[in-house]
């Protein structure tokens, strides 16, 4: 599999493809950065909030003892 990865500061109206890729099956993925993604110094908690404290786990009872194999 051959790939071409290119980053654009300003996306053009058309994107050229190398001649070796033409007339072949392929996949084009375009990810556009919006204004909210420009601040790369944010932490995960700033996007999703803090993870709440989970409740204490209730007693699980006693487990049976098994013989060693």
Image (spheres, rainbow, N blue to C red):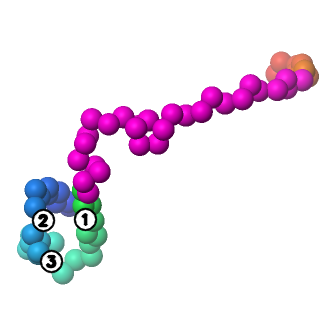
Instruction: Name the image quarter holding residue 44.
Output: top left
Q: Which mark is residue 22?
A: 3
* Label 2 residue SS: loop
Which one is closest to the eye, mark 3 or mark 2? 2
* Label 3 residue SS: loop
Which residue occupies 24% across, 61% down? 32
Give the vertical position of 69 relative to 38 (above or below).
above
Instruction: Name the image quarter holding residue 28.
Output: bottom left
State the residue position of label 2.
11
First in sequence: mark 3 vs mark 2 = 2
Give the extent of the magenta segment: 34-61
What is the quadrant of the C terminus in the image?
top right
- Residue 1 shows up from this direction: no
Which residue occupies 12% across, 65% down? 11
24 to the left or right of 64: left
First in sequence: mark 1 vs mark 3 = 3
Q: Which mark is residue 30?
A: 1
First in sequence: mark 2 vs mark 1 = 2
Crowd band around label 2 with a 10 angstrom C-alpha radius: few (<14), some (14–19), many (20+): few
Residue 40 sits inside the magenta stretch: yes
Residue in front for this viewpoint, 64 or 67: 64
Which one is closest to the eye, mark 2 or mark 1? 2
Crowd band around label 1 with a 10 angstrom C-alpha radius: few (<14), some (14–19), many (20+): few
Where residue 40 appears, x then y in whole percent?
26, 40
């Amino acid at each position: 599999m051959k790939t071409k990865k290119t980053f654009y500061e300003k996306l053009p109206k058309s994107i050229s493809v190398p001649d070796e890729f033409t007339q072949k099956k392929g996949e084009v993925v375009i990810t556009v950065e919006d204004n909210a993604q420009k601040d790369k110094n944010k932490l995960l908690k700033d996007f999703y909030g803090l993870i709440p404290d989970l409740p204490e786990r209730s007693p699980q009872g006693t487990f049976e003892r098994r013989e060693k194999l």
